[in-house]
Image (cartoon, rainbow, N blue to C red):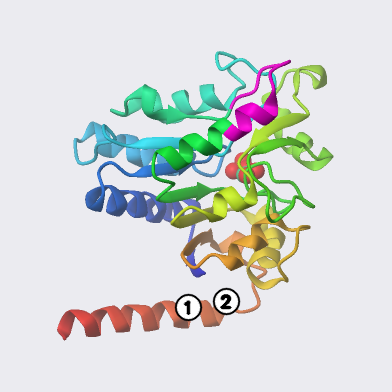
Amino acid sequence: MDIMIFKDCEAVAEAGAQVVRNLLAEKPAAVLGMATGNTPIRMYKKLIADCENKTLSFKDVTTFNLDEYHGISPRDPKSYRAYMQKELFDHIDIDSSNTHLPACAKGEDHRVLSHQYEALIEAKGGIDLQILGLGQNGHIGFNEPTSSLGSRTRIKTLTRGTLNDNRQYFDDDDAQPHLAITMGIATILEARRIMLLATGEGKADAVRQFVEGPVSAICPASALQFHNDVIVLLDEPAASSLAYRGYYERVREQKIYLADQLKEG
Ligand code: PGA
């Protein structure tokens, strides 16, 4: 894992946006895995600004979101489809037919829909860069603690903690879905590159557990330890519980040294 620690969430957003810019410069028709939540919003704003300045284009990009609530209409302002439209898609030059979220309305067969979502990702050549946030409980997507590390896209029951974290977005308890359809951990691990963003002190424990703790279903993000190309972008508060922080900084210095050597050679 490439652990990068920045002074604040603004710097995290800029670093995340730069990773996306670099990918699209190299591969304009990239497949991006998208995340919702508070954390990526600043990064999305930067990508929107790039599009407005015509320095970046999403016209050939395909996206797949991690998750969506079960039984929610895409037109519902609380849906993750609505979030993506508001926070990103409505403001960039992406072809909306290339933007995908998993979806499962009440009464639909979630097994069939989950399978179809996986098949579509595969048909588009797989995900080049999966963007992730991190739950305070260590979840990625809606893979809650105890999710199988081999899980694929499916329906998950949300934990009380996640319901509480997301309660602010719903007017009353009854309206808040307890189920979501989410890419599985094995699905996420198939992305060619993964970029996790975590900001704020509330994430410090989960960051320590997934980076430095044992791989365990109780901390789903710890499965990222199995992937060979993960970038972790943290602000100071989110990094504050890491035991090996000094080492991560030395690793970064040495990587820069190696890159400079290559340039000189
Ligand atoms: P947040 O959510 O970005 O709103 O903190 C992250 C997540 O739960 O994955």
Residue at image position (46%, 24%) is: 86
Numbered circle sitting on residue 249: 1
182 left or right, relative to 233: right
What amino acid is at disc 1? Glu
Image mark for residue 52: none
Residue 113 vs residue 42: left or right? right
Residue at (54%, 64%) from the top-left corner?
227
Residue on which the image places disc 2? 245
Classify 10 Å Cα crowding around label 2: few (below 14), some (14-19), many (20 and above): some
- Which residue is depicted at the point 23% across and 85% down? 261
- The amino acid at mark 2 is Arg
Magenta residues span 103-115
Mark 1 burial class by Cα count in 10 Å: few <14, some 14-19, many 20+: some
Q: Is mark 2 within 8 Å of ligand 1?
A: no
Q: Quadrant of ligand 1?
A: top right
Q: Is residue 16 above or below residue 166?
A: below
Q: Are marks 2 and 1 in contact (CB under 8 Å)?
A: yes
**Residue 107: in magenta span:** yes
Question: In the rendering, at what x and y percent does residue 142 appear?
Answer: 67, 41
**Secondary element at image label 1:** helix
Q: Position of residue 120 (x, y in %)?
A: 47, 34
Asked whether residue 193 appears in the rendered view, the answer is yes
Q: Nearer the viewer, residue 226 or 159?
A: 226
